[in-house]
Amino acid sequence: MNSILLATNVISNGISVFKPLYWLFGKCMGFLMDLLGNQYFLAIVIFTFATRLLLLPLNIKQQKTMARTTRLQPKIQKIQSKYPDPRDRAKLNQEMQDLYVREGHNPMNMGCGPMLFQMVFLMGIIGIIYYPLAYVLGIGDFNDNSQAIYDVIYPIYQNIAGDSDAKITYFQLNILENFDAYKEALITNFPKLFTPEKCEAISEYRESMNLFGLDMTAVPHWKDGIIVIIPILCLVTSLGSSLISTFIQKKNNPAASQQMGSMMLMMLMMPFFSFYIAFKVTAAVGFYWIISNIVAILQQIFIFKQYPPRKTQARLMVENTIERRSREENVKKIK
């Protein structure tokens, strides 16, 4: 989360390594907004659903791997009971490896693929939310001229804020929010960047950043009234996703349910952490988290219904038996 806050500081144009991702996501968002008549938040919803669908095969594979690991738990525990002495660790590891080879199972396949994908996707979303002028609206040389643009608009912003020490926190979003006040100065000083067509596009984009009367470029605060619903919904949907995930893990591996106390505590801490962070970033980021959590809940329920633990374990047992017999027959033919 610190990288998210770092990426949005003052006139930052984002983290360099993610800029190709910002560009790609910006093109996708621009296409969707053109297709949907400049409906920014509808584009975010569709974009989230589409990427979650891409992630679905990884999640299904993860579910199957968890079921296979659960099926092998009795055999794993039997091997572990043979070698209680830490000095026999090498023998324990060897027997465990032989078991996995014999069963055609790789426990590492559970991996962090889905989580890493979600983090990468989040950074891409951060790019199109915080840097829309450069990546969604395609003002090509904006990043190269960001310091000069800042120097032009900062005195104007001081007058707007009525404070000579006022600071601009989110540079490109600040331009969107105060574009009417900045427009003339930007056109005068940067006519090649802020053409009439680009200015019209910026104005339309600014209008699209309102959702049910809420300015989603704003950072939520308790004193700002109804906009605090965004962090609250972040908390509720994140808690829902964590609780459903815990329930499914218990169903997948009932024997491990007693060991899930510390894991459950961690899973409950993360929603409250996201609740805190939702007060540090713009409401548009919180909106994405809400949609992402809702889609995650629906996806988890779908996978659980389509691949129930007991049926999945039974199916894997049959598949494993067929595969093992096939390998044995191939060995016999070679001999």
Image (cartoon, rainbow, N blue to C red):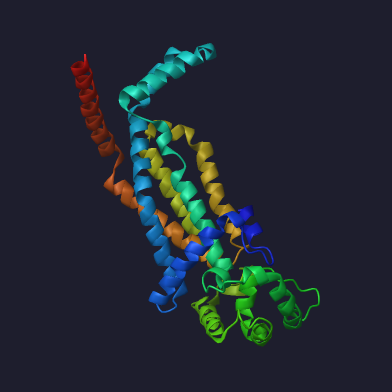
Q: Give the answer, above or below, for where 136 lies relative to 187.
A: above
Q: Nearer the viewer, residue 61 or 195?
A: 195
Determine the residue positioned at 64% across, 63% down.
Answer: 8
Q: Give the answer, above or below, for where 10 lies relative to 163.
A: above
Determine the residue positioned at 46% across, 72% down.
Answer: 30
Dividing the image into 4 quarters, which one contains the C terminus?
Answer: top left
Q: Position of residue 181 (x, y in %)?
A: 66, 85
Q: Position of residue 65 (x, y in %)?
A: 36, 36
Q: How many marks?
A: 0
Can residue 57 be seen from the camera position used here?
yes
Determine the residue positioned at 23% across, 28% down.
Answer: 323
Q: Nearer the viewer, residue 188 or 62?
A: 188
Q: Position of residue 51 (x, y in %)?
A: 40, 58
Q: Nearer the viewer, residue 138 or 39?
A: 138
Q: Can you tell which quarter of the image residue 166 is in?
A: bottom right
Determine the residue positioned at 38% across, 34% down.
Answer: 254
Outermost residue to the front: 192
Q: Is residue 245 left or right of residue 274?
A: left
Q: Give the answer, above or below, for where 177 lies relative to 298.
A: below
Q: Is residue 164 left or right of residue 256?
A: right
Q: Position of residue 128 (x, y in %)?
A: 53, 66
Q: Is residue 202 left or right of residue 91?
A: right
Can residue 283 be seen from the camera position used here?
no
Outermost residue to the right: 164
